[in-house]
Amino acid sequence: MKSWENKATRWLRVIHRDLGYVVVGLCLVYGISGILLNHMGESDPAYRSANHTVQLPSGLNGDGLAAAWNGAGSDLPALRRIMPIDDRHSRLMLDGGVGVYDSADGRLDYEVHRKRPFVYWINKLHYSKVRGWSVMADLFAVSLLFLAVSGLFMVRGKKGLAGRGKWYLIAGLLIPVVYILLS
């Protein structure tokens, strides 16, 4: 092998190795949040939701409903606003939640959302919703491209790109293509 090829391969390995260590934390952030976002279903994984019911007197108007809510207990979330839905129902906008009051039977069903700080912040990073993070996200993306391409040249011979590696590369390229064609 030529001297310049040895030097180039050596530097490629050094940069690949060291850059790989640097991006591990970013891979964890994107990997964990990606799994959470892929399986979030109907609810946002950054929040924990809890449903509750409170029995209040029936037939309350807006002021009476506010007074009953505020007097029902200190463990209830703060009431922000009451909005009529129809003649029978009112929507309560709560601190961190929302509720619906049925004036016919006095039942008030509400849900409260509590932030999961770790999940909330990694999701914000994943979506680049933190000021200045898009620069870091772009650097991470470029790093992943470099790691993918430089990794192709790490192994030589029959286990490398010239040997069975080309078949794995083709399989990896075909997975998204086949998925798109079948969906």
Image (cartoon, grey):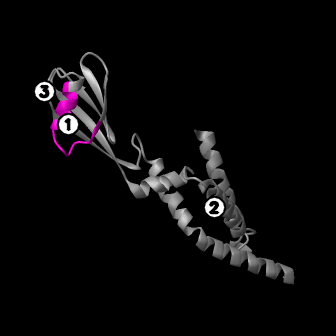
Q: Which of 57 and 4 is in front in this view?
A: 57
* Residue 20 found in image quarter: bottom right
Amino acid type at mark 3: Pro
- The Cα–Cα distance between marks 3 and 1, rounded to whole angstroms, is 13 Å
Query: Residue 85 at what x, y percent from top left?
Result: 31, 21
Label 1, residues with CA under 10 Å away: few <14, some 14-19, many ≥20: some
Residue 140: give its label: 2
Provide the residue span drawn in magenta: 64-79
- The Cα–Cα distance between marks 2 and 3, rounded to whole angstroms, is 57 Å
Q: Quadrant of the N terminus?
A: bottom right
Residue on which the image places disc 3? 57
* Residue 154 found in image quarter: bottom right
Find numbered disc 3 in the image and state the secondary structure of the residue it sits on.
loop
Residue on which the image places disc 1? 70
- Compared to residue 25, the image places residue 179 above or below, namely above
- The Cα–Cα distance between marks 1 and 2, rounded to whole angstroms, is 49 Å
Is 47 left, or right, of 67 in this rendering?
right
Total marks in image: 3
